[in-house]
Amino acid sequence: MVTIIQPNCRAQFTSEDMDFVVSVLTPASDRVQSLVRLFTDPDSLDVILDDDMIFRALLENAVCLRVSKQFYFYILVRHVLRRSGIDDRAVADYVAELLAEFSLAERARNPLPEGSQPMDYLVDMLAAIEKSDERTRFLIRAHVGNHSLFLSGVFPERVHFRAQFRGAPEMEYYESLGSANFRVAGDHRLAQQLELTPIFSRLAEQFHAIRLALNDMTDRIISLGDGSTILPQTSSSQAD
């Protein structure tokens, strides 16, 4: 069964994530319980997670973090999107979950059920749309949007290199393709049922700005190494 990416990073935070927040924000032991009580209130938790101290602590301790990849990516994505004027937590949550999911190579290659032929290239995905049923077309279009944002946002230098030396498409191609497919996917009845229409519409409208924010994030924050991973050594990445 295929599960489409949902804006649910915050629903997957672990006790270790909350321990990290407490360790950053409550040097005084008498404040711990009052802070922990706020975790049960989603609105209060959202405000807590926006604290720049948490963002800075993630950067300062990036070598070995005992936090989930959902927590790690949500804090980073939320920060860079807010810096870009995109103050929509649901969009930040979706993009963070996209990065968490696509940190698994197979998830980035195949939006279809287990056992289906992996699709490594956007041209393969677009070709598959023409011979698919309605539900599969929706899944593929959402994946094309996701894949375009992931590649152009996290690996811009790879896009530029391939365009310059291998005749591959320029960055504008990924922006146009990603935006268009998010827009079409957002108009689909399944997007409405899954309450993804507002998010897909925002991703379509602001694809360029979101892509630039992710470029800034990867340039300044995430060490990509040989390009095989976009995760620090977190507790969840160790288990993958």
Image (cartoon, grey):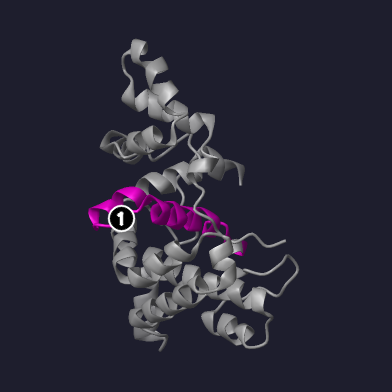
The part of the image, by quadrant, that contains residue 34 is: top left
The part of the image, by quadrant, that contains residue 165 is: bottom left
Q: Name the chief secondary structure element in magenta.
A: helix
Q: How crowded is mark 1: few (under 14 residues within 10 Å), some or many (20 or more)?
A: many
SS category of the residue bearing label 1: helix
| Left or right: 49 as drawn, with respect to 3 | left
Q: Which of 106 and 7 is in front in this view?
A: 7
Q: Position of residue 204 (x, y in %)?
A: 39, 72
Residue beneath label 1, please? Answer: 81
Query: Which three-letter amino acid code belongs to the residue tagged 1?
Result: Leu
Please state the total of marks drawn on the protein image. Answer: 1
**Magenta stretch: includes residue 199:** no
| Left or right: 58 as drawn, with respect to 147 | left
Residue extending furthest top?
30
The residue at the point 59 percent across, 83 percent down is 124
Range drawn in magenta: 77-106
The part of the image, by quadrant, that contains residue 62 is: top left
Q: Is residue 155 visible?
A: no
Q: Can residue 194 be seen in this view?
A: yes
Q: Nearer the viewer, residue 229 or 213?
A: 213
In this view, 59 is above or below 110: above
The residue at the point 46 percent across, 56 percent down is 94
Which quadrant: the N terminus? Answer: bottom right
In this view, 142 is above or below 228: below
| Left or right: 85 as drawn, with respect to 177 | left
Q: Where is residue 195 in the image (x, y as percent from the top left)?
A: 52, 59
